[in-house]
Image: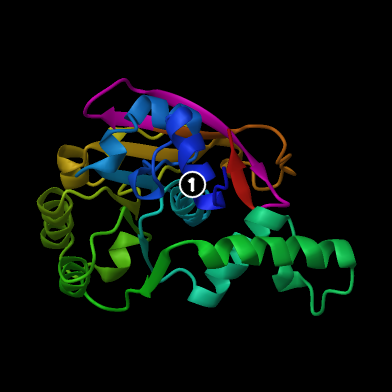
Amino acid sequence: MIKSIKEICKEIALENYIKKPDERLVSTGFAQLDSIIGINNLNGGYLMCIASMQGIGKSTFMLDLLLNSAITSEGEIFYFTNEFTSYRIVERLIQKLSSVNIEEVDEIYDSDMLNKVDAALSIISQLKITVIDYSETCENIKNILSFNRKPAMVLIDGFEAISHDFEKDFLIIRNLCKGLNIPIIISVWLERVQENRFRPTLNDVYPLVAKLADSVLILHRDSYFDVAEKQDDSIPDTELIICKNKNGELGTIRFKFDGETYSFIE
């Protein structure tokens, strides 16, 4: 019996209970985080807030979430940012997948590096990522989300940059999250800057965020305060403190920073 590749793939999928691409659940790409937050929560109207001091790696972590969510889901991922240009974001994603920082290389002559970059570009070009520079207003984000095809996830990096009225704008995003039934992850600065080694808590986050977000996660690193001390990136000293989790437990996940891929690793 002659069978096409498409027919064989369908049979294999059925035999192994593999979901069709458009049914794949979006994931953060971090097993511990998915387990604590709940993978089903991340596929509905769930509002997550990532907070940190400046320089901890908040935007880097948001790009990890962007890449991971785009790889795990066939749905479109919207990424609003004023931290990076679209071009710079693609360069960062290439580095995460290939370990090659093309920003520091004028021309790539090494064949191994070239192959790695080419492979990374092939993967990234297939991902459904839409990057939007939100030098706009929060109302424009509302319009973009309301009149476009429903995305699998929305990430908003540096929320304060679009906020003229933080409380009003945060409510707009929360209502979009619940009304459109889509997961939204936003990043914000801690409201109270820590000037010492005390670990930040939910009290250091904007009160409205602490009250209305479904989960609040704080990136923290004790060595951040040891500016004169050389840091060892291989040591998992970055903490993701889960200080609010509406539907589950609290806790801390430790990450190390991989300088080659410019990524956080559990």
| Front position in the image: 53 or 128 | 128
Is residue 261 shown left or right of residue 150?
Answer: right
* Residue 209 drawn above or below residue 171: above
User: At 58% across and 34% down in the image, what residue appears?
Assistant: 255
Question: Vertically, is 173 above or below 237?
Answer: below
- Residue matched to label 1: 7
The three-letter amino acid code for the residue at tag 1 is Glu
The percent position of residue 91, horizontal first and vertical second, equals 62, 68
Position of residue 3 relative to residue 253, above or below, is: below
User: Toward which corner of the image does residue 121 lie, by quadrant?
Assistant: bottom right
User: What's the residue at 49%, 30% (across, down)?
Assistant: 31
In the rendering, at what x and y percent does residue 220 appear? 48, 38
- Report the residue at 64% width, 53% height from top: 262
The residue drawn where x is 43% and y is 33% is 14
Left or right: residue 207 versus residue 71 is left
Residue 197 seen by the camera: no
| Image quadrant assignment for residue 129 | bottom left
Q: Which residues are magenta?
A: 242-261
Q: Main secondary structure of the magenta part?
A: strand
Is residue 152 or residue 138 the one in the foreground?
152
Q: Position of residue 97 (x, y in %)?
A: 65, 54
Secondary structure under the numbered disc 1 in the rendered image: helix
Does the magenta-highlighted stretch encompass residue 158? no
